[in-house]
Amino acid sequence: MRRIFYFRVAGSDVHLPKLIGAFIMFATALLFVQASSTMFDSWDTMKYYDKCILGINTNESISDQRAQFSNCADTLYRSTGIVTRLEHPLLTQRQFAIGLLGPMGALLLWLAVFFVGYTLYRTDKIILPIEERVRDLPDFPKSKFAYKRKR
């Protein structure tokens, strides 16, 4: 025999969890947009860096080439935090991944927090079914020998 109990998290007259959920959803929506714009900005900056490095004029003096490289590297560092060296000026795949995975992780984190806020917002509709099983045990036959307890 099974009985199912329904547990309601909050009723329709409890508004505080719904208000907290609405604030969380609004804040995470803004932070989600900010993280996505940071991700696209990092992508654009890394593409600009490649064009900037390849656009350095080799006919100029070494000091002018180093100044152009430091300008390109400084722009990349300020936007993404990636440090490039003069020995290997082009971005490696690892550096490219470092520049994109941080903003992508932040994007997914804010998406997960948004769903937590949505769950809090919908607490008046959440009903958790809790199942209880009742099982009848068979009667065991009484033994023929009765033991008396000593007092």
Image (tube, rainbow, N blue to C red):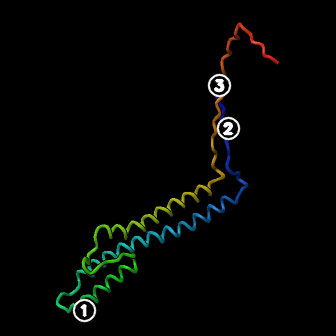
Indicate the amino acid at tag 2. Answer: Phe
User: Are the residues tagged 2 and 1 within 8 Å (C-beta)?
Assistant: no
Q: Point out the tag, 2 or 3, that comes first from the N-terminus.
A: 2
Q: How many marks?
A: 3
**Element assignment for label 1:** helix
Going 32% across and 86% down the picture, which residue do you hit? 71
Vertical comparison of 140 with 49: above or below: above
In whole angstroms, how far apart are the C-alphas of marks 2 and 3? Answer: 17 Å
Instruction: Of the two numbered discs 2 and 1 on the same chain, state the one appearing first in sequence.
Output: 2
Q: Nearer the viewer, residue 115 or 75?
A: 75
Residue drawn at the location 72% of the way across and 56% of the way down: 14
- Give the spatial CA distance, label 2 vs label 1: 78 Å
Tell me if mark 3 has few (under 14), some (14-19) or many (20+) residues whose alpha carbon lies within 10 angstroms of its own.
Answer: few
Q: Is residue 106 left or right of residue 12?
A: left
Give the residue number, with chain letter if any, for mark 2: 5
Q: Amino acid at mark 1?
A: Ser
Verify CB contact (< 8 Å) between mark 3 and mark 1.
Answer: no
**Which dot marks residue 72?**
none
Quadrant in which residue 96 is drawn? bottom left
Residue 9 appears left or right of 148? left
Which percent across, then down, holds residue 125?
Answer: 64, 50
Q: Is residue 34 above or below residue 5?
A: below
Mark 3 — residue? 135
- Badge 3 or badge 1: first in the primary sequence: 1
Q: Quadrant of the N terminus?
A: top right
Q: Which residue is mark 1?
A: 63
Q: Residue 115 at what x, y percent from top left?
A: 54, 57
Question: Looking at the figure, which quarter contains the C terminus?
Answer: top right
- The residue depicted at 57 percent of the width and 67 percent of the height is 26
Please name which of the two marks, 2 or 1, marks the residue nearer to the observer: 1
Front: mark 2 or 3: 3
